Amino acid sequence: MKFVVSVLFSLVLFSCVSAYDPLDPSGNITIKWDVMSWTPDGYVAVVTINNFQMYRHIMNPGWTLGWTWAKKEVIWSMVGAQTTEQGDCSKFKGNIPHCCKKTPTVVDLLPGVPYNQQYANCCKGGVIPAWGQDPLGAVSQFQVSIGQAGTSNKTVKLPKNFTLLGPGPGYTCGPAKVVPPTTFLTFDRRRKTQALMTWNVTCTYSQFLARKNPSCCVSFSSFYNETVTPCPSCACGCQDKSNCVKSDSKILNMVGVNTPRKDNTPLIQCTRHMCPIRVHWHVKLNYKDYWRVKISITNFNYRMNYSLWTLAVQHPNLNNVTQVFSFDYKPVVPYESINDTGMFYGLKYFNDVLMEAGPFGNVQSEVLLQKDKETFTFKQGWAFPRRVYFNGDECMLPPPDTYPFLPNSANQKELLSFTIFTSAVLVLLSNIW
């Protein structure tokens, strides 16, 4: 019996860490190495980081890529990226390598670097949009020249133990696997060339590994009930409650209070839920053939603004969205037979940046949905979403029994009892008269 319990526990734990996202089951980050040429002591490769996640992007301060060399390789030079440390290169005379570490750590270059240091799709500070939001921009590249390595397909040893921070923990990378060489088209599109060798590394995200508490919560309200269902208490953990700041605190007037820390330590406004982000879903209006929802996203972190933010929502009526007024919208269809998930994100140059906590720290929009008369109802909380994700992390929803329901059956029973009592009194009086 103990053995069975331990096996079941292991399976549950493995399933949590395995990074399966039911709304984006095939989402991943693929790191591709294309060997473009051989050198006397190694090779020149182009490394491409593709973000194939529908609604999870890599935000500022950007990605950090690491690995372990299989032999005694060194990095002679890089274009479009750099290592954070050079390491011990004292044994080299004359030409000094860019990095001699056994476990190099690579970061993207910042925008505005000289042109001779740039490469295609580089120099964005490590920020990579989500695939569903910007397919053309969901890529980062750099070129690297490797020495003291193999000089043919048979002698090259693949790097191992890949790690990816995006920008924090949560990603788990598999081993490098040799795949068919990448092909390229020339500018006139009349000739194909190919890499000399290609290998891929696939990294998947797990919120379970990224943090022990959620990073956002959801609250509900409706036109048919005065009750506002708040975020659950301590939804994002209350361990930082002693370090939170009240909205009227004098600390907020200090210079530099909004400057992010190197360790990304947040400065959270004191709230009941203690979440950096709150999503509010308000059922606003009911028409004959349509109904209307207002979505508000509020930032409670004074040290973080969210550029390229995304909001993924699962609701059965998202299969018939008529109009979204102040956000961009794209259906997310992980399963062809089910269309109940959509992604909202900001309009470029209008509200694609969610500012830090304060008077401008919120974005909002309204959504008009057409009713399906066979399924539409306001009963039992049907009008509220099943899942909500902000920037790819699932938000905590309130308990279902706290949703703003329609007037319950108890009131109707009381009304029916009163009606029966009144009728009985009238009958009794008529018999007396």
Image: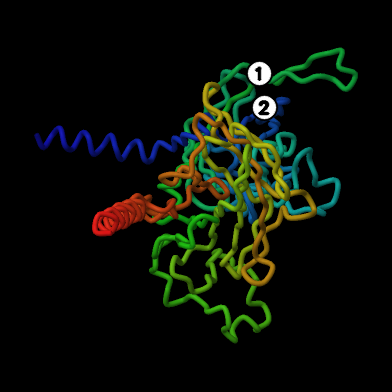
- Mark 1 and mark 2 lie on one chain; the one further toward the N terminus is 2
Residue at the front extreme, as displayed: 433
Q: Position of residue 428 (x, y in %)?
A: 25, 56
**The C terminus, quarter of image:** bottom left
Q: Position of residue 193 (x, y in %)?
A: 77, 16
Q: CA distance from mark 1 to mark 2?
A: 7 Å
Residue at the left extreme, as displayed: 1
Residue type marked 1: Pro
Residue type marked 2: Asp
Find out whether the residues at labels 1 and 2 contact each other: C-beta distance under 8 Å: yes
Q: Does any portion of residue 420 appear in the rendered image?
A: yes
The numbered mark at residue 273 is none
Closer to us: 213 or 192: 213
Where is 171 relative to 156, above or below? below
Q: Quadrant of residue 39?
A: top right
Q: Position of residue 398 (x, y in %)?
A: 41, 55
Task: Identify which residue is drawn at 64% across, 49% down.
Answer: 107
Q: Judging from the image, what secondary structure is the residue with disc 2 in?
A: strand
The numbered mark at residue 34 is 2
232 on left or right of 263: left
Where is 233 relative to 115, above or below? below
Task: Identify which residue is drawn at 49% across, 46% down.
Answer: 384
Q: Position of residue 190 (x, y in %)?
A: 87, 13
Q: Residues within 10 Å of mark 1 (few under 14, many from 20)?
A: some
Closer to us: 112 or 156: 112
Q: Judging from the image, what secondary structure is the residue with disc 1 in?
A: loop
Q: Quadrant of residue 279?
A: bottom right
Q: Residues within 10 Å of mark 2 (few under 14, many from 20)?
A: many
Q: According to the image, label 1 marks what residue?
A: 181
